[in-house]
Amino acid sequence: MNIDTQVLSKSGAASGLHAYNGLKAKGCRQPEAPKVTTEQTTKRMAWVTQVYAVRDHKDKAAFAEIFGYFAPRVKSFLMKSGASPDLAEECTQEVMATLWNKCHLFDPTKASVSTWIFTIARNRKIDLLRKQRRPEPEDLPWGPEPEPDQAEVLGLQQETEKLGAALATLPPEQRKLVEKAYLGELSHSEIAAQTGLPLGTIKSRIRLALERLRHAMK
C-alpha cells in the first residue's frame, strides 16, 4: 500500500468515526432486536400453573378450571371444523382425558397451553373419524344375521362379568354417575337436576370413570 492510499484509508476511517460520534451526540440509537412484550409472555404462560398442578399433584380443582374454560371452546372449535355435535362431545372428552393423563408432555417453551390443547383436539378428531368409518350401504350384509355360536356367547358373558368387576372398583361417586348415565339412560343435565351436582363435575367424574374402565377392560 502506498502513502496516498494509507492516508485515504485513515481519512475514511476517521470520517466514519466522526460521523458515528455525531450520530451518538444527536441521540440516535442503533437498531435493537425485537423484544417480547409482557402481554405476549402473559398469554403464553396462561394456564401453565394449572397444568403443572395437575401434572405434579393431580390437582382436581386445577383440572376443573381447565375443563370449565377449554371444554366448551374445544367443542365449538370442532363443530365449526365440521364435526357433528356427538363427535365433538366425544372428542372433547377424549381431549380432556389426554390432558389429565399426559400433561407431563406439555412444554411451555414450545407452545402455549391453548395451542397445545387445540392441537390435541385436531389430532383426536382425525383419529375418531378414522375409527368411525363405516361400510357403504352396498357393502352391508342382507338378511338375518346368523345366530352367535357358543364361543361368542361365552365371550360375551365373560366381558359382562369383567365389566361388572371393573365397575365395582370405581370410587362410589364415579360409579353412581356412570350407572345413572348408562344404565339409567339419563342425560348429564338430568343427572345434575337429580343430584344437585354442577354439570362440569358430572362430566369430569364420568370421563375419569370411563378412562378407568377402558384400562380395566384391556
Image (cartoon, grey):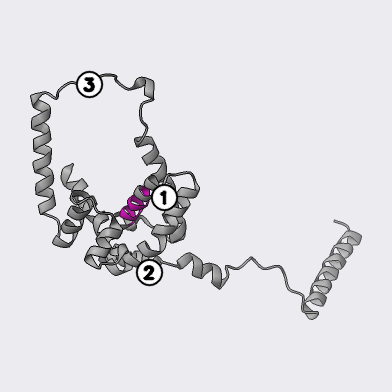
Q: Which image quarter holds the N terminus?
A: bottom right
Q: Give the number of the disc on residue 144.
A: 3
Depth order, front residue of 44/178: 178
Nearer to us of marks 1 and 3 is: 3
Residue 49 is marked as 2
Tag in front: 1 or 2: 1
Asked if residue 22 is positioned above or below residue 79 in the image, the reply reads below
* Numbered disc total: 3
Q: Main SS type for the magenta part?
A: helix
- Report the front residue among 140 and 93: 140
CA gap, disc 2 and disc 3: 57 Å
Q: Is residue 215 above or below residue 62?
A: above
Q: Residues within 10 Å of mark 3 (few under 14, many from 20)?
A: few
CB of mark 1 within 8 Å of CB of mark 2? Answer: no
Between disc 1 and disc 3, whose residue precedes?
Answer: 1
Residue 41 is marked as none
Give the magenta part as a residue range: 91-99
Q: Nearer the viewer, residue 192 or 120?
A: 192
Q: Spatial distance from mark 1 to mark 3, Cα to Cα?
A: 39 Å
Rendered image: mark on residue 121: 1
Give percent across and percent down for residue 180: 20, 55
Q: Quadrant of residue 178?
A: bottom left
Q: Is residue 65 magenta?
A: no
Type of residue at label 2?
A: Thr
Q: Residue at x 14, y 25 (%)?
A: 148
- Camera sees residue 129: yes
Please name which of the two marks, 2 or 3, marks the residue nearer to the observer.
Answer: 3
Give the left or right position of residue 147, taking residue 186 as reference.
left
Q: Residue furthest right?
A: 4
Residue 53 at x, y = what percent?
Answer: 31, 67
